[in-house]
Image: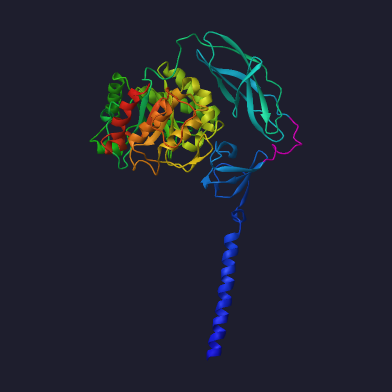
Amino acid sequence: MIRELLTVRRQHGKLLSILLVMVLMTTLLPAAAFAADKGAWAPNVSYTVNDTVTYGGATYQCRQSHTSLTGWEPPNVPALWLLVEDGGGGGTDDTTAPSVPANLKVTGTTSSSVTLSWSASTDNVGVTGYVVYQGANSVLTVSGTTATVTGLAASTSYVFSVAAKDAAGNTSAKSAQVTATTAPSGGNEGGGKLPKHTLTGYWQNFVNGAANLRLRDVPDEYDIIVLAFAEMDTSRPGAVKFNVDSSLSSALGGYSNADLISDIKAKQAKGKKVIISIGGEKGNIDLSTASPNVSNFVESMSSVIAQFGLDGLDVDLEHGMNVPNLTNAIRQIQQRVGSGFVLTMAPQTIDMQSENTTYMQLYKNLKDITTVINVQYYNSGCMLGRDGKCYSQGNVDFLTALSDLTLQWVSPSQLGLGVPATSSAAGGGYVDASVVNNALGCLATGTGCGSYKPVARYPDLRGAMTWSVNWDGTGGYRLAKTVKPYLERMP
């Protein structure tokens, strides 16, 4: 019996040893052993940590699991992708330049800007961008086929041309030139008569647990009120529609379109701006074609703006966008609305990680008529600040480090800090209103900072935004009543 017990113990000991070795081998295997090679990067694909892709001849490794979107190409979002092998733009044998851009034309002018568009070039590997020339000098590089050159003098003629480039550094010859004359001073300019530092809030046209509000109940602390959201009109490609939501109307005892229109006029009489948003978490607008999609969008959005007496629109698209067509559409709408047109944008944090994302391209195209870009500093993973370090949401360093990064490319007078009004308003990223003030002060005057110190002071910083006025209402409007007085005291 003793001999049999010893034999069993020896056998169990061998099994445990084998299991221990297997566990150790598994633990010591490099993470890359479990990575998947996903081939060429593409939008709308789910990537997990350590997956590898190729893009522009280079190899990248996934740093955070995500589903890709247009505008999140690996070079644009280093918080998601790590460059592990630089392919030199598809190899050293690529010596073929792209074709010359054709059909360059002027699509819009203001007293200080000219907007251009052209047909896409072709290349044996791929076109990566276009260089815009003002006379003999390059003034702008863009990834799409539209561009807006700003900082021009009123009532002045300028000559422009465009050249295409690829990842290997090959550049085409310049396109045929076009001449544009800027408008006289005092023409259509964005922003209206808003205060220097503004507070923006979204008004929810639906019921979701936040306070149900008539627009007249929105506190006067809010300078820009954004109606959320215009909806797709499925009967017409690209078109939108808007009415007071039936469930909200019922919750408010029969709130109607006529009531909303009356409330909008009352807010505007107090100097407030009321605009309408496209997009949101689930919404999208199909502007894939100029006709009929863009035409339908322009006509329907212009009709909604006219019906409700609105001051402009907000771009909150979170599922990709056609930048050239959206640029063209917004320009047409702006011309119809006139000099008081207000344009705001609400990109996600990841959309502002590089100057080459789709949102940054849209901003460059529309910079001359943009009122404010309110970056959504919430519902975000770890993102890179200007110092190259990765910051997690929900603190003053996240707000300041990422704003400092964006301020390399966006004018301080056009940047706002977007935050949730309460912890229930977003999946993550909530900070107390006092922390919002700290971040504003840190960026504007250098006071109230955490461990991150911005590289400069930005006293012209435009302000703050919150999702949403309704959620702010559940907390006694603490954000509005705390942040707005601080904005008024800013330089």
Q: Main secondary structure of the magenta part?
A: loop
Q: Residue 50: x, y in percent?
A: 58, 50
State whether residue 304 is above or below residue 35.
Answer: above
Whether residue 103 can be seen here: yes
Q: Residue 340: x, y in percent?
A: 40, 17
Whether residue 291 can be seen here: no
Instruction: Report if residue 234 lies within the magenta region.
Output: no
For this rendering, which residue is in front, 403 or 17? 17
Q: Identify the residue at horizontal 44%, vertical 24% (top origin).
A: 458
Please, which residue is most extreme toward the bottom here? 1
For this rendering, which residue is in front, 389 or 33? 389
Q: Is residue 220 left or right of residue 47?
A: left
Q: Identify the residue at horizontal 55%, vertical 78% (top origin).
A: 12
- Looking at the rendered structure, the number of numbered marks drawn on it comes to 0
Q: Residue 387: x, y in percent?
A: 52, 35
Q: Residue 450: x, y in percent?
A: 42, 36
In the image, the segment drawn in magenta is 86-96
